[in-house]
Amino acid sequence: MSGETPDRYPQPGSGHDSLSSRPLVDSHCHLADARLRDEVDETIARARLAGVTAIVSVGASGPIDTDRLAVEIADRNQGVYAVVGVHPHDASTCSDVRITQLRELAASPKVVGIGETGLDFHYMHSPAAAQEASLRRHFDLASSLNKPIVVHCRDAEKQLARIAEEAGMPARGGVIHCFTGDASAALMFLELGFFISFSGILTFRNAGRVREAARLVPVERLLVETDAPYLAPEPYRGKRNEPAYVTRTLAVLAELRGLSADAMARATAENAGRLFGFAV
């Protein structure tokens, strides 16, 4: 993950970065992040030029103000949707007041999911007990609002699967975003009913186990994302990521599955629409 900003952006609407008129969804990014919010209109415009027809923008970073801004950005931009929640890094702040605030924000018709919540036992910015308690609250909130849950998981696959099984999946389902596990973890999450979303990590040279997992996830359960401004795909690795670059990850995913980029774009867009409840 990097917050570096490239000196100059490529023109994603030209050449091999551009797709046909088929739908393409960046199913997870952070337009309200400090590294994107000041030029969010330009970022969305570049995504449109690259063929991105819908963007799911997640708040869930720091204070509730980030979630509020994510909803505001979605409200004023056609084809942009919001997800609100408390990131596992901030799980210690997931109070009753915060859950009430999220519930209020989720009344917007542009809010299509709850999260990203989850477990991150790699960085451990919040204690494990706080992360688990926050995750359970998010499962309850998603179920009560009839919205899907968006889940972050790092070095905690078995623990997360246990909690999901105990808490019960929301009727609308959920997604493991930015999948970083192996094939066995993917199968475990698929059995629970999750979609699996792949980010720019899929393009990294050392991501063999992630590519192996991507080969076995049923096409009807695949999503593609940027997680912008983090995790820019090759050849932009180390730069600030943005939704336009989802075409790079899509191309690798399509090649792994033996499909054209257009066919994979349509499949993952339809999956995102089915999960989040918007037209593609």
Image (cartoon, grey):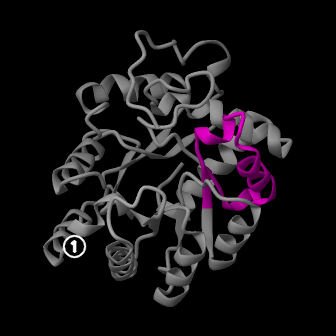
**Residue furthest toward the right?**
258
Residue 137 sits above or below residue 15 on the image: below
Based on the displayed image, in which of its 4 quarters is residue 260 positioned?
A: top right
Residue 121 inside the magenta-drawn segment: no
Residue 144 sits above or below residue 205 on the image: below
Magenta part of the chain: 196-223
Residue 13 in sight in this render? yes
Horizontally, is 170 left or right of 77 in the view?
Answer: right
Horizontally, is 46 left or right of 175 in the view?
Answer: left
Q: Residues within 10 Å of mark 1 (few under 14, many from 20)?
A: some
Looking at the picture, how far across and down is residue 130, in whole percent?
31, 74
Q: Helix or strand or loop: what does disc 1 sit on?
A: helix
Residue 113 in sight in this render? no
Looking at the picture, how far across and down is residue 51, in whole percent?
56, 29
Residue 215 inside the magenta-drawn segment: yes
Instruction: Looking at the picture, tell me which residue is in the foreground, 213 or 53.
Output: 213
Residue displayed at 35% across by 78% down: 129
Instruction: Looking at the picture, tell me which residue is in the foreground, 246 or 182.
Output: 182
Looking at the picture, how far across and down is residue 20, in whole percent?
65, 27
Total residue callouts: 1
Looking at the picture, how far across and down is residue 207, in whole percent?
70, 43
Based on the displayed image, in which of its 4 quarters is residue 99 positioned?
A: bottom left
Q: Amino acid at mark 1?
A: Ile
Residue identifier under label 1: 99
Based on the displayed image, in which of its 4 quarters is residue 128 positioned?
A: bottom left
Residue 125 sits above or below residue 253 on the image: below
Horizontally, is 215 left or right of 229 in the view?
Answer: right
Residue displayed at 39% across by 61% down: 124
Instruction: Looking at the picture, tell me which residue is in the foreground, 4 or 258.
Output: 4
**Residue furthest toward the left?**
97
Residue displayed at 47% across by 28% down: 47
